[in-house]
Image (cartoon, coloured by chain):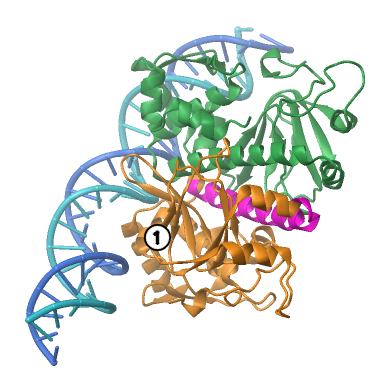
Chain colours: A orange, B green, C cyan, D blue
Amino acid sequence: MFSDRHFITKPGGMPLGFPSSGDRGHETPVEAMFGRHVRPLRAGTTLLLEGDRNDTIFCVMTGWLSLSKSLCDGQVQIIDFAMPIDIIDPAAADGTTSCVTVEALTDGAVAAIPHASWVRLTEDWPEARHVMRSMDAARAARRAERMLRLGKGTAEMRIAYALLELCIRLDRVPNMPSNDFHVPLTQQQLGDYVGLSSVHVCRTMRRMARNGILTMKNHMDIRILEPEALAELAGIMREDLRRCILPF
Amino acid sequence: MFSDRHFITKPGGMPLGFPSSGDRGHETPVEAMFGRHVRPLRAGTTLLLEGDRNDTIFCVMTGWLSLSKSLCDGQVQIIDFAMPIDIIDPAAADGTTSCVTVEALTDGAVAAIPHASWVRLTEDWPEARHVMRSMDAARAARRAERMLRLGKGTAEMRIAYALLELCIRLDRVPNMPSNDFHVPLTQQQLGDYVGLSSVHVCRTMRRMARNGILTMKNHMDIRILEPEALAELAGIMREDLRRCILPF
DNA sequence: CGCTGAGTTGAAGTATTTCAAAAGCTGTGG
DNA sequence: CCACAGCTTTTGAAATACTTCAACTCAGCG
């Protein structure tokens, strides 16, 4: 039961940036690799726990994943979301254990590829390394922006930034930015992403809505009414952010 | 005027993990590359500002650098410290601008290598890519641990963690952990690292000292008296952390 | 000696959390 | 169709962790 809104390629299609056969019947080696390892995923499934042994990387085909860590008292921090196109390497420095918990937030599909196979594949294909660098840089930039606001920003800034970031990541069509989007998250999860309690997330978003900056419908269908005002709150210009956190 | 305590290789030596000529007079290609681009650095120098055009990566030979971002109101968040061995790629997703400000915290030396040269060099040398993956994983794990505490941890936990992290990164001799170390930081900078005001950093560290967990001498010479208690406050076991954030 | 910058301490202010209760929505079974 | 359970959201009130402001100390340095 895949939800359409989370598709960025059709099922089985190639993520942007990787060479594709263009659906003409024969597969590229990368398509073959992904195809061999792809598996469906139900919302709520845990793929991996922090500290688990793991030697695979994940490529998200459809749906959203969360990468999180938690404290012994049960508090959770979501480190990042992964959506279609994203390739996740959960490995810690030792290369054999995962430093994050990986969970499916929605139904979807993901390819779990043994790291060794992935390395072998990219050996023969320098372009892939170029694509990976771009993805790595985007991920790092995104996390750094959020870390800045986690450390020094107000609740309003953190939430405004998070919404802007997600809005940008969800933009399908370049040069045709949309201000309407859906995030498959509860306020609790959004709070875990920006380091706030769900109560304060609620209050803050409600205030933004009251001020005419955005509207919210049935659990997180968001429409940004005043992109400029939101960017102002987030402390960044939309186009700058887009350039920094979007690969390709 | 290099301060001895910041050397991890002797000047001009190769960082751990990279093949070295062993000082027998002829250079490996990597040594040659680093040597060609190395330059000395004085404490306080800014190498790069957030948003600057940049197509180089940096390899820290000696000294400490900080990677930071700041809000328009002037508040600073230090994203990470870089020390000898570390290779920094400050690029944002567009590949041509830097997403962080890079500053020298101490005197030292760095090699600034054009990204294209670095890619060419590693094309011929798959091992380097392996080393880089290990470094990337260590960096990501470190930042994720800190992000967790930035979002969900108390001041005490953030500082305990930061001290433990720095202590581990400064350990020279594997299997011979030391609890004595120096961090070339003001309390203000430590606060910028963990998202706290300098005043609160002071109070919190003083409390730890009062409780017999550590001692501090002349601006940040730290001795951990109770490693177990500090790890408890930080919410992590020292050996686990070491394995996750130390490459090689 | 008087300056400067960092660290220290107290008191007041503020942002955010926690606790608690109620309201809204969704699916399930009678 | 209703009743009910379970979950998320919403709102208020009290508690708390951290910041800000301001004054003072201390060490290094011309």
- Range of residues picked out in magenta: A123-150
Q: Residue at x 39, y 59 (%)?
A: A189
| B172 over B135 or under it: above or below | above
State yes or no: residue B209 in magenta: no
Q: Would residue A239 be seen by someone viewing this image from the given angle?
A: no
Q: Nearer the viewer, residue B141 or B199?
A: B141
x, y percent for residue A125: 78, 56
Left/right placement of residue B75 relative to residue A31 reads: left
The quadrant of the image that shows the N terminus of chain A is: bottom left
Q: Nearer the viewer, residue A157 or C8?
A: A157
Left/right placement of residue B99 relative to residue A123 reads: left
Residue occupying the far right of the picture: B26
Crowding at dot 1, Cα within 10 Å, few <14 / some 14-19 / many 20+, comes out as: some
- Quadrant of residue A207 in the image? bottom left
Q: Which residue is mark 1?
A: A45
Residue type at mark 1 is Thr
- Quadrant of residue B229 in the image? top left
x, y percent for residue B236: 41, 32
